[in-house]
Image (cartoon, grey):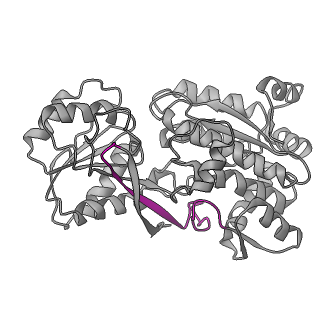
Amino acid sequence: MTAFVAAATLALSGCGGSSGASDASAAAAGNGMVVGALLPLTGTIAYLAPPEVAAIKLAVNDINAAGGVLGKDVTEVEADTSDGEHADQNTSAAQSVLAKHPSVVIGPAASGVVKNVYKSIVSEKIPVISMASTSMTLSGMDPYFFRTVAPDAVQGAVMGDLIAGDGVKKLAIACFNDEYGTGMRDIILERLNGAGVDVVYGEQDAFDPAETNYSSIASAIKDSDADATLIISYDQATPLIKSLASAGVDTHRLYLVDGNTVDYSKTYDAGLLKGSKGTIPGAHVDDAFLAALKGTGTEVSDTTYAAETYDAVILSALAAEQGGSASGETIQKNLASVSGADGGEKCDSFKACKALIKDKKKIQYSGKTGIGAFNKNNDPSSANIGVYEYDDKNVNVFQAMQSGDVPSE
């Protein structure tokens, strides 16, 4: 069965003792594995939450259906971090989850949120596995920080090649002033250097994430005479694209990134985005996995980072199983190994991998994402980037998968 425990119940289990690392580990080891989740249930990236919620439920279901971890059901607790613009909520969400003595924390989704909260978590010797934070500055940040998504170097390279390969000569960039935004922009600019693409707007400028009126940006892009526009943002893209269309900018030649490559079929008039393209890290979700996500009872329309979330939970459970304890320290010590860093026999489910572990075999979990084993920075050693194109209904349709190695230096 799915072992989801109400926050009040779990809070009682944590009363009466120190909140230190040893107590947290003891609670995890003695009462079964607890998966903490820090999710953007509200804020500018709230659209990411439904697939992440569904993926955690599905992973816990699959683990418990296979006998749980070390013979006990896994439980899950979650809290809403919102986005990086809400630092107080980031902190309170982390403290709420920590109070439940998690064995591991899945999330946060945004790089800025990770930076706001990770120290309070890893100081308790609890590993953090982000499914969606892609900033290059997070690589190798802490021995207890991992991620199942590639840093921006991989997506940035794919996007740069896509723009140049499509024959764009004059590019405008609308980028929000956020670590994710400016970091991604700089990587793409580096990739475009020498590729014959002239950046005619936005090479250095960035707009406030709280901006609500994009008419001046749209007018400037129109006046730049760009033949394509790259938008690096979260949900700020929705009003920005409307402003671009009103200003007469060609909305059939837009390039979007994972923060805004979503289904706009209910947002704009049919055909507004036809031909525009976007990139999303991770393997394309197949029909069977999508059906399983929907089977959790969560309404899922977008699957961005669902596979990364699912694999983060499975990897942490396998690390506990291999190490013989659900403590954070044990999980941290075994995560790289179960990901395949030490080689081993490939297996593609918790059940199959667990059987190999019981047979004293080394494993290499080959999950939904198709990522390589964790490297020395606790990043995936290789990753996939999906390329999508918008159809006449403004739906982002999968076109191709690009693979790339993740730098570790």
Q: Is residue 264 above or below residue 359?
A: above
Is any atom of residue 57 visible in this view? Answer: yes
Quadrant hosting residue 114: top right
Residue 135 in the image, given as x and y percentages of width and height: 45, 50
Q: Nearer the viewer, residue 15 or 400?
A: 400
Q: Main secondary structure of the magenta part?
A: loop
Q: Nearer the viewer, residue 128 or 163?
A: 163
Is any atom of residue 146 visible in this view? Answer: no
For the N terminus, which image quadrant? top right
Q: Nearer the viewer, residue 65 or 340?
A: 65
Q: Is residue 2 shown in magenta?
A: no
Q: Residue at x 9, y 44 (%)?
A: 224
Q: Is residue 349 above or below residue 266?
A: below
Residue 153 in the image, given as x and y percentages of width and height: 41, 60
Q: Residue at x 41, y 41 (%)?
A: 263
Q: Is residue 373 shown in magenta?
A: yes
Q: Residue at x 48, y 28 (%)?
A: 43
The span shown in magenta is 366-394
Q: Residue at x 58, y 68 (%)?
A: 372
